[in-house]
């Protein structure tokens, strides 16, 4: 009886050890998880016009101006630069823009509208490798203050396809036609 239990116990210990090793290869959740906003927003509609992929940093008691400094180029999120794909030619903030995939940067402002930048570089970490000569267009994003506090950076598209970027008590809007 002891001889038949020993191989079974060895096999069981080996299996448990291999499961633990495999589980340890997975990273923990990102502190600024990725998210996607698209227009149309319904998941049932696959024929999108625009989609933005970004990471969602959280304020966690910190000041927005320290995380997105005024008058400095910002990746508009965390981790990699925000990526925006237009599946059709559009008018972005009043300027024509060809279909394609771009990086989206912003230049925050303390008391006025933000500069919203569509840049042709892709797969950039943060804004460290941003080059202004790669800008396709720069437009003014209408900044407004709201009463509520948006803890995690959020992006959405309104019914008229306006891109809304919200964080803290600031919302920046850019029209898309």
Image: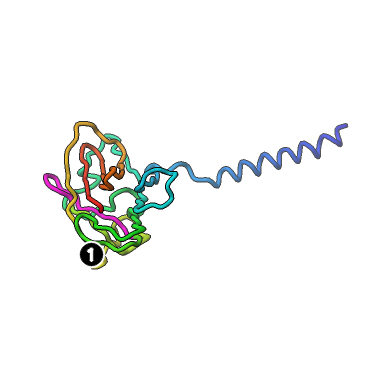
Q: Position of residue 116 (x, y in %)?
A: 22, 54
Q: Residue furthest left?
A: 111
Q: Nearer the viewer, residue 58 or 47?
A: 47
Q: Position of residue 86 (x, y in %)?
A: 34, 57
**Does 71 sit above or below residue 29?**
below
Q: Residue at x 23, y 53 (%)?
A: 106
Q: Position of residue 10 (x, y in %)?
A: 76, 40
Q: Which residues are magenta?
A: 102-114
**Does 104 sit above or below residue 9?**
below
Scheme by which the image is coloured = rainbow
Q: Residue at x 25, y 52 (%)?
A: 176
Q: Secondary structure at mark 1?
A: helix
Q: Mark 1: give few (<14), some (14-19) or many (20+) Cα within 10 Å.
A: few
* Position of residue 124 in the picture relative to residue 2 (left or right): left
**Does 140 sit above or below residue 150?**
below
Q: Residue furthest bottom?
A: 133
Q: Is residue 87 covered in magenta?
A: no
Q: Position of residue 171 (x, y in %)?
A: 22, 41
Give the quadrant of residue 156.
Answer: top left
Residue at the spot of label 1 = 132
Q: Residue at x 25, y 38 (%)?
A: 62
Instruction: Please count the marks in the image.
Output: 1
Q: Nearer the viewer, residue 98 or 115?
A: 98
Q: Nearer the viewer, residue 51 or 73?
A: 51
């Amino acid at each position: 009886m002891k001889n038949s239990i020993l191989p079974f116990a060895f096999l069981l210990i080996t299996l448990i050890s291999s499961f633990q090793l495999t589980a340890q290869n997975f990273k923990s959740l990102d502190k600024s998880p990725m998210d996607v906003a698209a227009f149309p927003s319904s998941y049932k509609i696959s024929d999108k016009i625009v989609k933005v992929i970004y990471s969602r940093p959280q304020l966690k008691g910190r000041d927005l101006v320290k995380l997105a400094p005024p008058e400095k180029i910002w990746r508009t999120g965390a981790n990699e630069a925000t990526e925006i794909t237009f599946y059709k030619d559009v008018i972005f903030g009043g300027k024509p823009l060809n279909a394609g995939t771009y990086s989206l940067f912003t230049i925050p402002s303390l008391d006025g509208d933000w500069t919203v930048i569509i840049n042709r570089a892709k797969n950039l970490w943060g804004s460290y490798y941003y080059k202004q000569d790669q800008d396709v267009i720069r437009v003014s994003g209408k900044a407004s203050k709201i009463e509520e506090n948006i803890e995690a950076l959020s992006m959405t598209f309104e019914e008229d396809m306006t891109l809304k970027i919200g964080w803290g008590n600031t919302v920046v809007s850019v029209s898309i036609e």
